[in-house]
Image: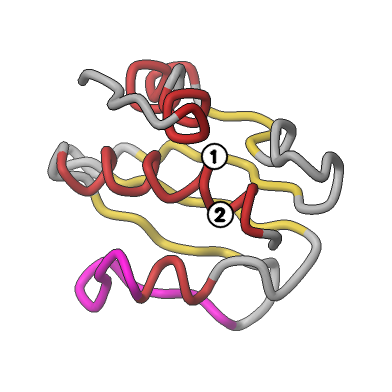
Amino acid sequence: MNPNERARIQPVVERILAAGLHIKVDDGGDNVITPKTQTLADIMAELGHTDQDNLVVIGPEKKIREIALIYGNAEDGSEVIADYSGSLEDLVEGVSNDALSGRSATA
């Protein structure tokens, strides 16, 4: 994961956590963070060790949603968020562009 990709991902993770949701990082292998042990730092440290990760977002109703991250598609990080569940649109849309331009995104 390059710095531009990190700059697009971190604000999304921050918004998800601020909304009271939990995140599991699934890199397709055995390395998965459980919601009970996560912090922003833990989540960000687990990202980018493979070509792609899935952020598994779990709400209080145990509903599972996902954000697919694919690294290396664009040097500016613009394509790192490859797909996401529609119900996460308010938490994902606009955040990454605001992060790179130095503006604060609104919730």
Looking at the rendered image, the quarter that the C terminus falls into is top left
Using a 10 Å C-alpha cutoff, classify the residue at mark 2 as few (fewer than 14 neighbours), some (14 to 19) or many (20 or more): some
Identity of the residue drawn at 50% across and 40% down: 66
Instruction: List the residue tagged with mark 2.
Output: 6
The quadrant holding residue 47 is bottom right
Q: Is residue 10 magenta?
A: no
Identity of the residue drawn at 20% across and 73% down: 36
Using a 10 Å C-alpha cutoff, classify the residue at mark 1 as few (fewer than 14 neighbours), some (14 to 19) or many (20 or more): many
Q: Position of residue 17 (x, y in %)?
A: 22, 48
Instruction: List the residue tagged with mark 1.
Output: 67
Identity of the residue drawn at 36% across and 76% down: 42
Q: Position of residue 84 (x, y in %)?
A: 56, 29
Q: Earlier in the sequence, mark 1 or mark 2?
A: 2
Outermost residue to the front:
102
Amino acid tagged 2: Arg
- Of 15 and 27, nearer the camera is 15
Q: Give the magenta part as a residue range.
A: 31-41
Identity of the residue drawn at 63% across and 36% down: 81
Looking at the rendered image, the quarter that the N terminus falls into is bottom right
- Of 92 and 32, nearer the camera is 92
Distance from disc 1 to disc 2, alpha carbons, whole Å, reads 14 Å
Left or right relative to 3: residue 76: right
Amino acid tagged 1: Ile
Badge 2 marks a residue whose secondary structure is: helix
Q: Position of residue 62 (x, y in %)?
A: 24, 44
- Tag of residue 40: none
